[in-house]
Image: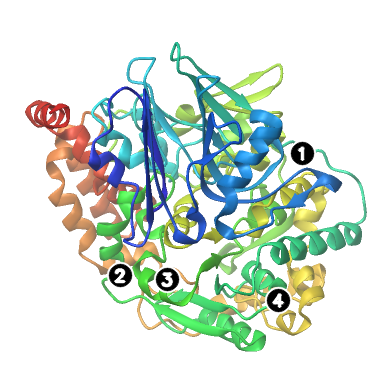
Amino acid sequence: MVGLCGAVDDRTPPDEFVDAIAWRDDEVAHRFVDDGLSVFGSFHPLLSGEQPARARNGEALVWVWGDVYGFGADESYVPRDGPPDGSARYCADLYDQYGMDFVRELNGDFGLVVYDRTAGTVSLVTDRVATRPFFISRPDGERLVFSSLLQALPLHPDVDPQFEAPYLQEYFQLRRVFGVETPLSGVREVPPGSIATVDLADGSLSVDTYWRPSYEPVDEDFETYLDRFTDTFQTVVEEWTRDDLDYGILLSGGSDSRLVQAAMDQPVTAFHIADWMSREANVALEAAETAGDEFHLLQRDPDHEAAALERNPAISNFSGWFDQAYFTGFEDEICEEVDVLVSGLYADSLFKGSKLDARSLSLGSVGTLKLPTRNPVESVEDYVALQTTEVVDPVSYLPGRPPIDSVIADNIRETRDGVVSHGVEYGSLQDLVLYGDFYPMGADTDATFSRSLMHMRPYRTPFLDNRLLDLQQQVPMRYFLQRDFVDRAVEQLSPALAEIPHARTGMPLKHRFPVDWVGGNLKVLWRKHVGDETPPEDHLDHSPWPDRAALLRARNFPIETIVENREPLRELPFVDYEGALDSYRTHMAGDDRSPVLYSLLTFLEAPVLDRVTESDDEASERRTVVEQ
């Protein structure tokens, strides 16, 4: 894996803390130790460069984890020129010109560390949505320990890990923790779009948020916005593709990744993950062949999920389940083929209204129709209800815990300036509804997916470019539910790809919204009741992912993992071993407990659990070894 870690402390951190941010043998390691500060990095060779980069005055050092695309806003925006590994040098030059204000107009997917010897400060900087997080702990209010990986922090001797029951409950029931909170006591994430600065003289910490999303729609016609969206998207992709690099695209049977494919002006390698040649796999294959791209089916074997449970919790920041690092089991195959990975992730969140509470019409046993209108969210209570619509409550292995809606509500308050949820400020309740599930990215239930890709290869998703984020905030809400930017953009950029049906709806992307909505709903109902190919096994599905509820019943690793971890389940005060067994038995009897079981399995295999439950003697011995 790649990332940054370090400490504002006179002692050099132990090797196990530093080594935790490394994943592959081919990563480039950087080490810096100065009076009262240590910084360690592990980077992809393509992006590493010489780090830290030194500003011209010689007294400021800059590290970049990730990639910087350019600088400026609106018409003054200029893409970064030069080699892929030039981000740190680029940022150091901007720091010379603008000081820390340069990050306000910085475009990219990055986490920065800036050490200014003259000012006596160390700053941790996140991009607009904190795609690359920093987790921080302040053991005594002066020292600071930071890491891009939550699981690594307890490996530092100054961090005494304990669990925060309310936030751990959010993870168990909702697959994520909102805002900047974490399940570890005293550990928080640096807010999105923010500069967290430590004064080395007195140890004080200040946080300056330089960007937050603000939905301010401008009433223009759809075609105007479609043209802006398509042109901006194509510009973004063209700016950051190079002829001398090989690109891999995570190609689904839907439209989001197909738009990325349509915007690329060179052949790519298309990767599709599945258990069998499902309907979606066949659509992805057709799209690859139509575009002239090489197609790789990454086919899971029967032991894939059990192996993922052993492998993936080590990179978990408690935002997603172990199996959502979907591609790590195929890492070697992917890395042999391509230099850079791209995806269409976050199109749904930004341009398809997936975060809006769309109305639905129940047809009884026939099925449910999703309607192109929304239920208004007019209060914090409405927002909490929206977040907990499908939650199982109570959970057998969380005895005595309050209802999850009260846990969430206790961490949200309205202010004169907007709403604060779990330590993150939003300008309005509407902004919280629209952006709270990915500002910061750690609040997204799929964040493990994106962040696991970052560790494998340099990775980008065009939808999080500043220019598309800015555009989204201007689009009238009706277009998110009653139009389809992505489908229409595919039609403009590649009519041949638009002829191929969407795997879920069965409708070609070229159709306008009314036809697509009616035809898609009818097709879904037809497949449900009349004629759909039956998967070869009960836990398999026509989507790229297995049916988790059925998979838990088909494999032994879930109960084996629970039984193997019976001691920590008995030791921790807020979870219960017998309750865990009860959740599993209830699921096996037919009730769906897969969400809380997948969260529990991820938690039980996370390395941090070993640190929290280690004996006092083990902890003392570990600290003694470190001090020696």
Residue 282: image location, x then y, percent: 54, 85
Q: From the image, state whether disc 4 or disc 1 is nearer to you.
A: 4
- As drawn, 500 above or below 166: below
**Which mark is first along the chain, 1 or 2?**
1
SS of the residue under disc 3: helix
Q: Residue furthest front?
A: 57
Residue 72: image location, x then y, percent: 76, 43
- Assess whether mark 1 and mark 2 are in contact (beta carbons under 8 angstroms): no
SS of the residue under disc 2: helix
Please rate how many residues cluster around mark 3, counting C-alpha atoms within 10 Å: few if below 14, some from 14 to 19, many from 20. some
**Which mark is first along the chain, 2 or 3?**
2
- Left or right of 274 on screen, residue 265: right
Find disc 3 in the rendering and name its residue. 335
SS of the residue under disc 4: loop
The image quadrant that residue 5 belongs to is top left
The quadrant in which the C terminus is found is top left
Amino acid type of disc 1?
Tyr
Of 71 and 61, nearer the camera is 61
Q: What residue appears at the point 15 percent right and 28 percent down from the top-left corner?
A: 623
Residue 376: image location, x then y, percent: 72, 40
Find disc 1 in the rendering and name its residue. 215
Find disc 4 in the rendering and name its residue. 265
